[in-house]
Image (tube, grey):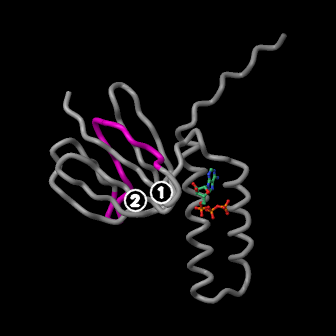
Amino acid sequence: MSNIRLDVVSAERVVYSDDVDLVVAPGTDGELGILPYHAPLMTTLEAGELRIKKGGEEFYLAISGGFLEVRPDRVIILADAAERVEEIDIARAEAARRRAEEQLQRQLSKAEAASVEAALRRSLTRLRVVQKRRKRRPPTAPP
Ligand code: ATP
């Protein structure tokens, strides 16, 4: 089966780089599915889940918005921040969510409110991706 190169890059690191069969990204105008031979495209991304299919496997990332470019031979995602589901620190995301919710109770300027709302969206995206996609360990049998 043919595939397409996917590079997901954040300001800090290459988060994912491989040949894949399908990419489903959170486009600003809705979910965007990209298969090999997709027409060239440049678009913005919202905070949301990035779903990747490769062979029989699926991989999930939380991304915090950014840009997506489809070139003839590859898909490039420049993400504000991105984490694979297994990398997400749940306690940190919960703390970030609580902090943002507390801040939103206060009197904020428009710019402050926009920044706190963006932080809230990032934390909720991380928590949603973990909740939906992280495999739970089976309960350990009693001794
Ligand atoms: P925090 O307030 O906890 O730093 P944040 O949403 O402000 O959260 P970002 O600015 O989006 O953090 O990201 C900074 C860096 O930390 C990025 O590399 C991002 O991938 C990573 N990061 C942020 N939150 C988490 C998390 N819950 N688990 C794993 N990595 C995270």
Depth check: 77 or 124 in front? 77
Q: Look at 57% across and 36% down and name the residue there.
A: 134
Quarter of the figure that contains the N terminus: top left
Residue 69 image point, x, y percent: 28, 58
Q: Look at 50% across and 52% down and name the residue there.
A: 13
What residue is disc 2 on?
A: 78
22 magenta-colored: yes
Quadrant for ligand 1 reads bottom right
Look at the numbered disc 1 and say if its residue's Cβ is closer than 8 Å to ligand 1. yes
- Helix, strand or loop at disc 1? strand
Q: Look at 53% across and 57% down and name the residue there.
A: 12
Residue 41 image point, x, y percent: 21, 60
Asked if labels 1 and 2 touch by Cβ distance under 8 angstroms, the answer is yes
Residue 114 image point, x, y percent: 56, 79
What amino acid is at disc 2?
Answer: Leu
125 magenta-colored: no
Question: Sequence-wise, which precedes: disc 2 or disc 1?
Answer: 1
- Helix, strand or loop at disc 2? strand
What amino acid is at disc 1?
Answer: Ser
Depth check: 134 or 141 in front? 134
